Image: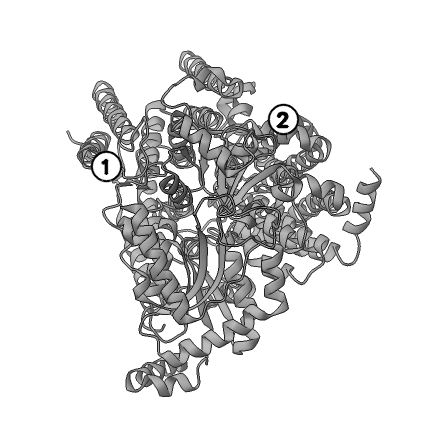
């Protein structure tokens, strides 16, 4: 049966193979000739990686112990990943402040949080970071494409 | 919401007429993109200039470090920002070299150059106890033993070295280090025999006498190291070095460029800025917009000859 | 000695002491936030020092440095989100202790160990800086290669369950570290024409992704399983005196290792923390405790990373070259003040040198006090309900990934590695080897190739340079002792 302990190493083997093809297409250096070229180490490591993954697969097949597995990605973690990406996209569009206020509020609503205190804490946090970065550390926060 | 409205109005204003917008410039903070990391030489010059010009411009300039690709990421980012004078970029010699090496899409033509800030020559340095005492000693050794003299290179490829190699038809064994902070200890520890850096990068070792300067690659001697002869004085016609300046995206209105240029002239003349540059052994070279643009064109051609 | 006493007088003077405290406190806060590093802190403060007197200016910057390295441990212990690569080794045992309810103890060990590491480092700096400088100058490409090779063997000892899985994480990290322009020949590798990749993948967003974001996702998943928000139990018991006596030798040893590593330009707190952890595990009576909340592991990592602080000033003060990014800023600060870093500083401006030395000692004491006084306050962070803490961790991670280089691209990197770290976690593949490989991979590769250029293709540098040979033997020995340990564990 295909499970994660076989699928993941197999995936890495496939990726390493693609890398080996890419490595063979590295351009020739123009300015520096070196005894060991730019392609040697990436190729060596990709090959070692394929060997490790191969051994891992064999090891797993020999290991008869079957452990009951939780699903790799639960619905909650998928929400987490989508939330992360949406937040990052929102930041690049409307900037840190708005994106964080919207993001945090949405998150609390999604989890059906009813305590008003939590909302207040969330907003205070967002503004504190805004103040800390902008005024104290003088580090620019993302402004967002729409506003700058 | 207020901000949104304001931004919308500013944008509308920009579309309607660039010159009417320029009238109340600057009305908000200016960003200065530094294409190298916080703490480096370019960063320090950018931050000091920003600090010195804030009172002159009546608005603060916040420095934004955007590193990567030996300056390519930050400079391309700066070139592609809105041309409203609120995003400026520190441009360095890499804008002339990287595009010709195929490592950067934007070129100096994507900027309206405002002012050159500093121009620093390369100095040829050897350990204090090195058998080389003049540049000619070094060239003679390289001629009799081609590819044997170990050169600590601050970058790969190294245009200071290539300029010397080309003019003298010699070849050194260039070991690529990551900047002067690695190259100088390598020479101090006698792992390599010679390096080339700007005076500011080696001023501590020059003052303490740990390193010996064989020659400076400028057309005239440098005030910080008055005893070091130029290569020209030693009969070698090689002039090379590095420079920094300030640029804005190419569609920035001329009024704004002019206004900023005058402000930077004043800033570079402040005691604070002059003091900072003098202590760091950097030479202020305040070329005006046109001269700076011509200079960059010339340097681009020069580098092109070395690269191809 | 007289200079040192005068230095202490000035460290406690009204002009210096407040900026010192400000610097350390600011550094601790910066270090605790993901993505904000001590380097950024000192670079941002640099222009403000132009108008200051030399001593307070340098003292403030050094305070930020010392505080910043320590600050990373707080978030690492409590939230499993190391602020800097230097505190990634702290997570291994520090966070495990916090989970077991020993947060206060872990925080106090971190504070004490950091203090001891920093103090030893400063004392060694004062006593034998010129000798260390000579040692540092002997380091060049072959030695750096050997050091990196030795460092890579630590992967074996941080691979908790399966060596093979640790090695796989290591090769993934090595390949990631090769993205970008090859530093030797400028050939683009795996860049796909994306300019943001030319200088390689920045380690800070990777760190944030692998540790902070993946931990956020992990917590989010657990949230669904038990609806009740139970505050984890813990007590406010700090480090006891017998325990202190137990970890003291580890701290001293790690402080010394950290000082040596710090004094070599280009090798910093991240390598030191892992090397000290490795060494502490090697000599431990119960090495199986490492990774499961070992006091020694935590103490080694913390005194190891703070032990670098004094060491990294060695090349700056004796040679006038910066040993790391922070001392590069300090170099700038010295020059702006009209001082010449290097040997001349000792003869021309001894008051500055000893002012720096004594205020480093005072800064370490201030750090210890902040660490201890803050324990109750820091522990409160654990009591914050998970439902609100998770988004805070995630938001801070995203902002931190952005702030390190003002780049949304880095945010994308952080999210990608967050997802990778989350999946690897499920497969029981450890994340720390990826980090170690990214730190050490480029160091090993470029220095090996640099050595070959220096030696014109000959490999003789592997055996005719004593320091390089020593590190290669260390590497062999490190692999051997880890293998022996694994074998013993299996048979036990």
Judging depth in this view, the residue of C373 and B30 nearest the camera is B30
At a point 57% along the width and 75% down the height, the residue shown is B55
Horizontal and vertical percent position of residue B70: 38, 49
Is residue C411 in sight in this rendering? no
Question: Which residue in the structure is indicated by mark 2?
Answer: C253
Q: Which sits in the foreground, C185 or B30?
A: C185
**Left or right relative to C30: residue C365:** right
Q: Does residue C279 appear in the picture of this structure?
A: yes
Numbered disc 1: secondary structure: loop
Name the spot of residue A69 as percent of width and height, x first: 26, 34
Q: Quadrant of the rendered structure where residue C157 is?
A: top left
Q: Nearer the viewer, residue B276 or A119?
A: B276
Residue C74, x across and y down, in percent: 55, 46
Q: Is there CB contact under 8 Å for labels 1 and 2? A: no
* Subunit of label 2: C
Image height check: is B99 above or below A43?
below
Against C306, is A77 above or below?
below
> Which quadrant of the view contains residue B289?
bottom left
Label 1 packing within 10 angstroms: few (<14), some (14-19), many (20+): some
Chain for mark 1?
A
């Amino acid at each position: 049966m295909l499970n994660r302990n076989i699928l993941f190493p197999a995936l890495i083997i496939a990726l390493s193979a693609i890398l080996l093809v890419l490595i063979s297409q590295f351009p020739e250096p123009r300015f520096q000739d070196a005894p060991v070229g730019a392609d040697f180490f990436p190729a060596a490591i990709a090959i070692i990686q394929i060997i490790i993954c191969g051994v891992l697969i064999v090891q797993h097949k020999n290991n008869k112990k079957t452990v009951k597995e939780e699903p790799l990605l639960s619905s909650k973690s998928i929400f987490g990943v989508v939330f992360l990406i949406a937040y990052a996209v929102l930041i690049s569009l409307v900037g840190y402040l708005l994106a964080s206020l919207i993001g945090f509020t949405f998150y609390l609503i999604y989890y059906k949080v009813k305590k008003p205190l939590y909302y207040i804490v969330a907003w205070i946090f967002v503004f504190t970071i805004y103040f800390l970065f902008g005024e104290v550390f003088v580090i620019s926060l993302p402004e967002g494409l729409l506003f700058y | 919401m207020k901000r949104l409205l304001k931004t919308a109005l500013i944008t509308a204003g920009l579309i309607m007429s660039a010159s009417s917008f320029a009238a109340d410039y600057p009305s908000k903070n200016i960003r200065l993109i530094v294409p190298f990391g916080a703490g480096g030489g370019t960063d320090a010059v950018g931050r000091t200039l920003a600090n010195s010009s804030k009172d002159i411009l009546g608005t603060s300039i916040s420095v934004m470090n955007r590193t990567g690709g030996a300056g390519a990421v930050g400079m391309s980012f700066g070139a592609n920002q809105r041309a409203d004078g609120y995003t400026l970029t520190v441009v360095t010699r890499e804008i002339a070299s990287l595009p010709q090496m195929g490592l950067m899409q934007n070129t100096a033509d994507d900027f309206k150059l405002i002012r050159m800030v500093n121009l620093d020559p390369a100095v040829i340095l050897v350990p204090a106890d090195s058998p080389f005492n003049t540049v000619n000693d070094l060239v003679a050794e390289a001629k009799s033993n081609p590819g044997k003299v170990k050169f600590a290179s601050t970058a790969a490829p190294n245009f200071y070295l290539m300029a010397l190699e080309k003019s003298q038809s010699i070849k050194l064994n260039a070991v690529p280090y990551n900047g002067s902070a690695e190259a100088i200890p390598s020479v101090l520890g006698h792992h390599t025999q010679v390096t080339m850096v700007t005076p500011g990068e080696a001023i501590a070792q020059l003052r303490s006498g740990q390193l010996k300067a064989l020659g400076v690659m400028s057309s005239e001697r440098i005030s910080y190291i008055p005893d070091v002869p130029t290569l020209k004085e030693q009969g070698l016609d090689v002039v090379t070095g590095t420079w920094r300046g300030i640029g804005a995206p190419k569609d920035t209105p001329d009024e704004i460029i002019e206004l900023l240029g005058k402000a930077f002239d004043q800033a570079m003349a402040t005691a604070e800025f002059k003091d900072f540059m003098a202590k760091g052994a950097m030479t202020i070279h305040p070329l005006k917009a046109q001269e700076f643009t011509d200079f960059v064109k010339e340097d681009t051609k020069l580098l092109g000859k070395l690269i191809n | 000695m007289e200079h040192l006493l005068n230095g202490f007088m000035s460290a406690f003077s009204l002009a210096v002491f407040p900026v010192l405290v400000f610097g350390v406190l600011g550094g601790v806060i910066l270090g605790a936030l993901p993505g904000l590093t001590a380097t950024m802190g000192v670079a941002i403060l640099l222009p403000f020092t132009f108008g200051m007197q030399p001593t307070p200016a340098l003292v403030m910057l050094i305070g930020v440095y010392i505080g910043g390295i320590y600050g990373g441990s707080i978030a690492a212990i409590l939230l499993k989100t190391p602020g800097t690569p230097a505190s990634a080794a702290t997570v291994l045992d520090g966070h495990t202790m916090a989970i077991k309810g020993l947060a206060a103890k872990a925080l106090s060990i971190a504070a004490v160990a950091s203090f001891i590491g920093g103090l030893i480092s400063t004392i060694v700096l004062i006593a034998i800086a010129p000798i260390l400088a000579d040692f540092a100058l002997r380091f060049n490409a072959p030695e750096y290669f050997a050091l990196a090779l030795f460092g890579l063997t630590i992967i074996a000892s941080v691979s908790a369950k399966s060596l093979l899985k640790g090695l796989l994480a290591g090769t993934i990290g090595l390949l990631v570290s090769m993205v970008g322009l090859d530093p030797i020949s400028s050939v683009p590798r795996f860049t796909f024409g994306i300019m943001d990749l030319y200088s390689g993948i920045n380690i800070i967003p990777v760190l944030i992704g692998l540790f902070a974001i993946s931990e956020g996702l992990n917590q989010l998943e657990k949230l669904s399983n038990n609806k009740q928000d139970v505050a984890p139990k813990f007590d406010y018991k700090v480090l006891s005196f017998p325990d202190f006596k137990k970890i003291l030798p580890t701290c001293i040893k790690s402080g010394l290792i950290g000082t040596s590593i710090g004094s070599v330009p280009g090798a910093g707190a991240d390598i030191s923390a892992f090397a000290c952890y490795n060494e502490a595990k090697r000599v431990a009576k119960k090495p199986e405790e490492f990774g499961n909340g070992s006091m020694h592991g935590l103490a080694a990592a913390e005194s190891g990373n703070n032990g670098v602080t004094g060491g990294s000033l060695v090349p700056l003060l004796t040679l006038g070259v910066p040993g790391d990014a922070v001392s590069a800023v300090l170099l700038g600060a010295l020059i702006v003040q009209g001082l010449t870093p290097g040997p001349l500083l000792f003869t021309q401006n001894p008051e500055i040198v000893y002012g720096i030395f004594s205020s480093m000692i005072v800064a370490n004491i201030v750090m210890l006090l902040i660490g201890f006084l803050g324990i109750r306050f820091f522990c409160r962070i654990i009591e914050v309900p998970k439902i609100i803490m998770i988004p805070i961790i995630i938001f801070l991670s995203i902002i931190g990934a952005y702030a390190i280089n003002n780049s949304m691209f880095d945010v994308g990197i952080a999210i990608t590695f967050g997802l990778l770290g989350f999946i690897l976690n499920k497969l029981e593949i450890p994340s720390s080897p990826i980090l170690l490989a990214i730190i050490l991979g480029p160091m090993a590769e470029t220095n090996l190739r640099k050595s070959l250029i220096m030696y014109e293709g000959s490999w003789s540098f592997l055996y005719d340079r004593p320091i390089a040979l020593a590190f290669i033997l260390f590497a062999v020995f490190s692999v051997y002792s880890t293998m022996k340990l694994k074998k013993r564990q299996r048979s036990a």
